[in-house]
Amino acid sequence: MFKQMKSSWGSHSFTISLLRLWLGITWVYAGWYKATDPQFLTPNTSGYIGTQLANYQLNSPISFLLRHMVERAGIVGLFVMLSEFAIGFATLTGFMLVYASIGGLLMSATLWLSASWSVKPYFLGSDTAYVVMWAVLLGSVFKSSRRLKLPNFSDRREVISLASIAGLSILGVVAGKAFTRKAQSTQQSQSTSNSSQAIAKVSDIAVGKAIHIKDAQGAPGYIFRTNAGVFAYSAICTHQGCSVNFNSGTKHFQCPCHGAEFDPSNGAKVLAGPARSPLAKIKIKVNGDDIFLA
């Protein structure tokens, strides 16, 4: 397998090798990011894969496909994680690189037609760029091989290579989930010990301003103050899970990834962008000047 990796990297130009390295690392990181996200496979959360797919299908040209994916969101989410790890590792090792490139292209195209379809202007949607990058890599690899070669299961080295890619992908998901459980356990212990401690003071927040907080699970959020009181919202964008920022000029929350905008003075409802659901609320209670997680 290592000999094959060395030969694979030596057969490409510097530009294609750099592109391949970027795509491989990015796809492995994407799989790890989802595997360590406690909300990705958890129903009724803003980061749940089913919630994301349901938002995408509202304006997507492949809404019919996304509708079926929503019904099997848990399986789809697990498949996405495993596929991202497998495509990333295959791209880095060079094993079945043509098929890895096809997989990366299809995944990016699906994201472009769903997550990034309603993003305007189009260049703010990174999935468009990944479609082009995977197409370039596929064209380069296919040009050198000129055929789609299926794995030869009678070849011991190919079987070992295929098993290694599959094993690394499964290990990545398992390790990510184990890491998440440990982190959640630590956060729950900390939140239990700090449950009687105030997370902020009302007097420290000017009307029309917001401050950073963390919810009971350690996820980022904001407390926003209006003339009517203080309100807490998750900082996780309901479109694709990016962290929103507070714009002190507009007094709105804005997503830097795809341009979604939310109004914290009106329940964090969507004002602009591809998101279709308001930011999730974080339960808080106020006792005098002190603010606590509820």
Image (cartoon, rainbow, N blue to C red):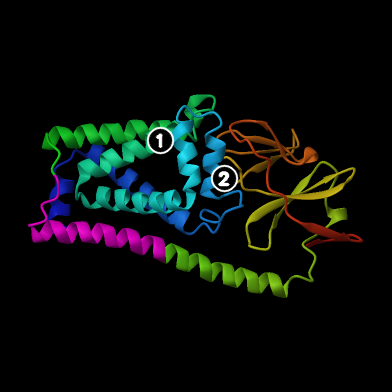
Which residue is denoted by mark 1 in the rendering? 110
Could you tell me which quadrant the N terminus lies in? bottom left
- In this view, the residue in front, 275 or 141, is 275
Residue 83 seen anywhere in this rendered image of the structure: yes
Which residue is denoted by mark 2 in the rendering? 51
Give the quarter of the image for residue 246: top right
x, y (%) of residue 169?
Answer: 33, 58
Please give the label number shown on residue 257. none
Decide: marks 1, 2 in contact (CB < 8 A)? no
**Circle 1: element type:** helix
Label 2, residues with CA under 10 Å away: few <14, some 14-19, many ≥20: many
- The amino acid type found where label 1 is placed reads Thr
* 212 versus 252 height, above or below: below
**Magenta stretch containing residue 161, yes or no?**
yes
Q: Which residue sits furthest right?
A: 288
x, y (%) of residue 159?
Answer: 15, 59
* 167 versus 250 height, above or below: below
- The amino acid type found where label 2 is placed reads Thr
Q: CA distance from mark 1 to mark 2?
A: 16 Å
Give the quarter of the image for residue 279: top right
Q: Which residues are magenta?
A: 150-174
Residue 30 seen anywhere in this rendered image of the structure: no
- Image check: 48 left or right of 98? right
Q: Which residue sits furthest left?
A: 154
- Image check: 223 left or right of 207? left
- Image check: 28 left or right of 40? left
- Image check: 93 left or right of 218? left
**Residue at horizontal 46 percent and vertical 40 percent from the top:** 68
**Magenta stretch containing residue 51, yes or no?**
no
